[in-house]
Image (cartoon, rainbow, N blue to C red):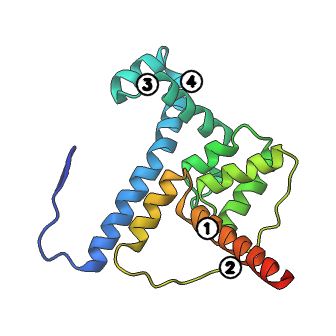
Amino acid sequence: MTKRTTLSIPDGMPINAWRNLGRQIFVISDSSAWWLGDWLIYGQAQYPDRYRHAIAETSLDYQTLRNYAWVARRFTPKRRREKLSFQHHAEVASLPEADQDELLLAAEVQGWSRNELRRQIQYRRDGRTRDVESVSLQVQLETGQKQRWQEAAERADKDLLAWIVSCLDNAATQALETAAINGAH
């Protein structure tokens, strides 16, 4: 049972049904920016004053609606990557189409967050390149560790993975410097 501000879930829902419901909610949430963009594009051809009506119907501001329409216009449905968020697409929307496709493919294959994609774009703008090697790790965490790490990452204005990699790089640098100092004596 759903209402605008409530999702009522029956007692005893099996875990698979609960997971499927979460996945469906995510898909709806993640799709809404595309849908609003496509809705506005349609309105452009059919109705005058579409933004005035769209603002009234959605309570979203003009700039947000314009951004949705602009990104949707930059990516035909065939070029939209289902495994990536609308925000991934928005990050590359101002780039030439070939660069968009190259970066979105890399983001999809490498599993980049939107923030990592943004960093990769900045590296390109700065004329730098980064060799990226993908490594998969499984870490067993004690209760509370992930939450503590997440909070630290947010305070450093990084996503969790970028923060972990940064911490590992710092630890490696410190260990190598210490070894060099100790080896020199």
SS label for mark 4: helix
* Residue at the spot 69% in from the left edge and 40% down from the top edge: 93
Question: Given the image, on which type of amino acid does mark 1 rest?
Answer: Cys
Considering only order in the chain, which callout, 4 or 1, is on the residue closer to the N terminus? 4
User: In the rendered image, which residue does mark 4 sit on?
Assistant: 45
User: In the rendered image, which residue does mark 1 sit on?
Assistant: 167
Q: CA distance from mark 2 to mark 1?
A: 16 Å
Considering only order in the chain, which callout, 4 or 3, is on the residue closer to the N terminus? 4
How many other residues sit within 10 Å of disc 1, few (<14), some (14-19) or many (≥20)? few
In this rendering, which labeled residue sits more in front, label 3 or label 4? Answer: 3
Considering only order in the chain, which callout, 2 or 4, is on the residue closer to the N terminus? 4
How many other residues sit within 10 Å of disc 2, few (<14), some (14-19) or many (≥20)? few
Quarter of the rendering occupied by the C terminus: bottom right
User: In the rendered image, which residue does mark 2 sit on?
Assistant: 135
Q: CA distance from mark 4 to mark 2?
A: 48 Å
Question: Given the image, on which type of amino acid does mark 2 rest?
Answer: Val
SS label for mark 1: helix
- Residue 129 placement: quadrant: bottom right
CB of mark 4 within 8 Å of CB of mark 2?
Answer: no
Judge whether 156 appears above or below 12 on screen.
above
Q: Which mark is residue 61?
A: 3
Residue 121, horizontal then vertical, whole percent: 75, 48
